[in-house]
Image (cartoon, rainbow, N blue to C red):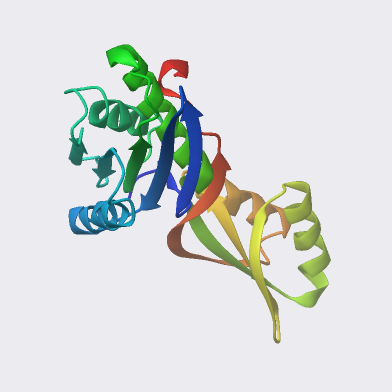
Amino acid sequence: MLQQYKTIAGYGEDEIVIERSRFIGYAQRVTSEEEASAFIAMIKKKHWDATHNCSAFVIGENAQIQRSSDDGEPSGTAGKPILECIKKNGVKDTVVVVTRYFGGIKLGAGGLVRAYTAGTVTALKAAGIVVHTLHQKISISVDYTWWGKVENELRIGQQRVVGTDYTDKVTVHVLIPEGEQDAFTAYMTDATNGQAHIVLGEKEYVEVPVEAVGAEEV
């Protein structure tokens, strides 16, 4: 599993106007090329009357699947900028479609690149970019006499508590960033004079929002 990766939170849609042309950006999280192609087809069907529906996607743990389409715009002025903006933002498992309704003013090659990049950023911001950071789930069981101490230590350390069970003992479940579990286990063992029963659980990702940026800002 990757220590960390970025993707989008889900579906996003927003619109900008540049020199009277409408650029509508759409973004969606996908896990396969088939899903990405289906999303692009859906947007094309929705905007069958648009001048262009340009698109790109990046899929896979190592971003191994990458595709882009200019959909009739001059070569390299639409699909590639969309793809490069997705890659500059570092997001995976993401498809973006930027729909254009021509407003009567030609933008030129450079203008198109900037416009489709802006449309992509608009879509990514609407969807929301998140960082998934790998964490280790750890369960700590103690007698009730030690619970106040454990609770206080977790609060001081601002640990991510995901649940607490109250039975014959108190068992609290926390998520610790990957690589920090040994130090955390040693600390809690010391804090409880060895009275805590500590069990390592499964690894899972914790999702944290981040800002989308334009390709030229990276």
Residue ID at (47%, 48%): 13
* Location of residue 142 by image quarter: bottom right
Residue at the front extreme, as displayed: 104
Please tell me how many numbered marks the rendered image carries: 0
- Decide if residue 125 is on the left or right side of residue 73: right
Q: Quadrant of the C terminus?
A: top left
Taking 63 as reference, is 109 above or below it?
Answer: above
Regarding residue 178, the answer to whether it shows in the image is no
Residue at the bottom extreme, as displayed: 168
Residue 57 location in percent, x, y?
27, 42
The front one of 178 and 77 is 77
Residue 184 location in percent, x, y?
59, 49
Residue 122 location in percent, x, y?
48, 36
Regarding residue 154, the answer to whether it shows in the image is yes
Taking 167 as reference, is 61 above or below it?
Answer: above
Residue ID at (34%, 43%): 96
The front one of 195 and 168 is 168
* Location of residue 117 by image quarter: top left
* Location of residue 147 by image quarter: bottom right
Residue ID at (18%, 39%): 67
Residue ID at (29%, 58%): 42
- Decide if residue 12 is on the left or right side of residue 80: right
Residue 171 location in percent, x, y?
66, 74
- Decide if residue 118 is on the left or right side of residue 174: left
